[in-house]
């Protein structure tokens, strides 16, 4: 009989439907162009890893608190019944419904509202938290530098802080031992919670990601459910 552990390992390597992690194509923070040639329009000749800012801000800024009244009730942090098959401790992202669940016990989970990747950029599959950072730097991936002039401004990385799109904390998803380039992170755009806006990443309110950051460890399993592109 195939063990659940073996299935999980297979899922980490392949993701749902056999789709591999995008890290194999898009590189990583110190090599966002994946070792490929990149012309000036893609920012390739501008990128210099020696200019990367610190991985975490040396300043531990206060975490801004967004009042509940600014967030729709269903997207506020709340304890809910949970009937999924995942074990306690697992994070489960439901992109179509814009929720992230932290399974706390069989039958119950803390549910958070999230913003998710736009259609065409969403990732699905099994992963693990491979790294955690406070007030992290942001290094835009190649595809974003190519299509977004605002991202090109930060081709060498944006320092962590309140203006950084990764917000107060970031959890880095790894699959098959490789960085998927997808993050569970904070946001300086609380109005994006409950919407499809972020290019592939999973946004949370800064106060929510700060709470979750303190409750999970490197190695925590993460399931990102398949999306219909809602």
Image: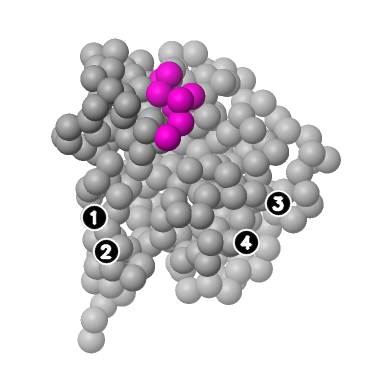
Measured as percent of width and height from the top left, residue 202 is found at 51, 46
- The answer for how far apart the CA atoms under marks 3 and 2 are is 30 Å
Q: Is residue 100 depicted above or below 84 in this figure? A: above
Residue designated by label 4 = 97
- The answer for how far apart the CA atoms under marks 4 and 1 are is 27 Å
Q: Which of the 4 image quarters holds residue 208?
A: top right
Measured as percent of width and height from the top left, residue 109 is found at 60, 61
Q: Give the range drawn in magenta.
A: 147-154
Are dots 4 and 2 in contact, CB under 8 Å? Answer: no
Write the residue at 29% across / 53% down: 21
User: Who comes first in sequence, dot 4 or dot 1?
Assistant: 4
Q: Within 10 angstroms of label 4, few (less than 14), some, or many (20 or more) residues?
A: some
Q: Within 10 angstroms of label 3, few (less than 14), some, or many (20 or more) residues?
A: many
User: Who comes first in sequence, dot 1 or dot 2?
Assistant: 2
Left or right of 183, for residue 9: left
Write the residue at 64% across / 33% down: 189
- The answer for how far apart the CA atoms under marks 1 and 2 are is 8 Å
> Which residue sits furthest bottom?
1
- Secondary element at tag 3: helix
Residue designated by label 2 = 14
Residue designated by label 3 = 75
The nearer-to-camera label among 3 and 4 is: 4
135 or 153, nearer to the observer? 153
Are dots 3 and 2 in contact, CB under 8 Å? Answer: no
- Secondary element at tag 1: loop
- Secondary element at tag 2: helix
């Amino acid at each position: 009989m195939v063990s659940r552990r073996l299935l999980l390992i297979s899922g980490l390597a392949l993701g749902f439907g056999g789709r591999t992690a995008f890290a194999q194509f898009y590189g990583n923070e110190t090599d966002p162009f994946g070792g490929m040639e990149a012309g000036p329009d893609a920012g390739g000749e501008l990128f210099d890893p020696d200019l990367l800012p610190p991985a975490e801000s040396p300043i531990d800024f206060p975490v801004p608190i967004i009042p509940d009244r600014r967030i729709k009730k269903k997207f506020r942090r709340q304890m809910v019944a949970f009937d999924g098959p995942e074990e306690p401790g697992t994070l489960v992202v439901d992109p179509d419904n814009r929720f992230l669940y932290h399974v706390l016990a069989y039958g119950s989970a803390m549910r958070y509202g999230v913003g998710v990747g736009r259609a065409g950029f969403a990732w699905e599959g099994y992963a693990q938290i491979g790294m955690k950072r406070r007030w992290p730097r942001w290094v835009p991936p190649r595809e974003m530098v190519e299509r977004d002039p605002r991202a090109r401004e930060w081709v060498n990385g944006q320092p962590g802080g309140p203006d950084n799109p990764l917000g107060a904390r970031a959890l880095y998803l790894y699959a098959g031992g490789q960085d998927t380039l997808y993050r569970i992170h904070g946001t300086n755009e609380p109005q994006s919670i409950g919407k499809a806006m972020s290019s592939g990443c999973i946004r949370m309110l800064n106060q929510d990601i700060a709470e979750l950051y303190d409750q999970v460890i490197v190695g925590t399993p993460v399931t990102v459910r398949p999306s219909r592109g809602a």
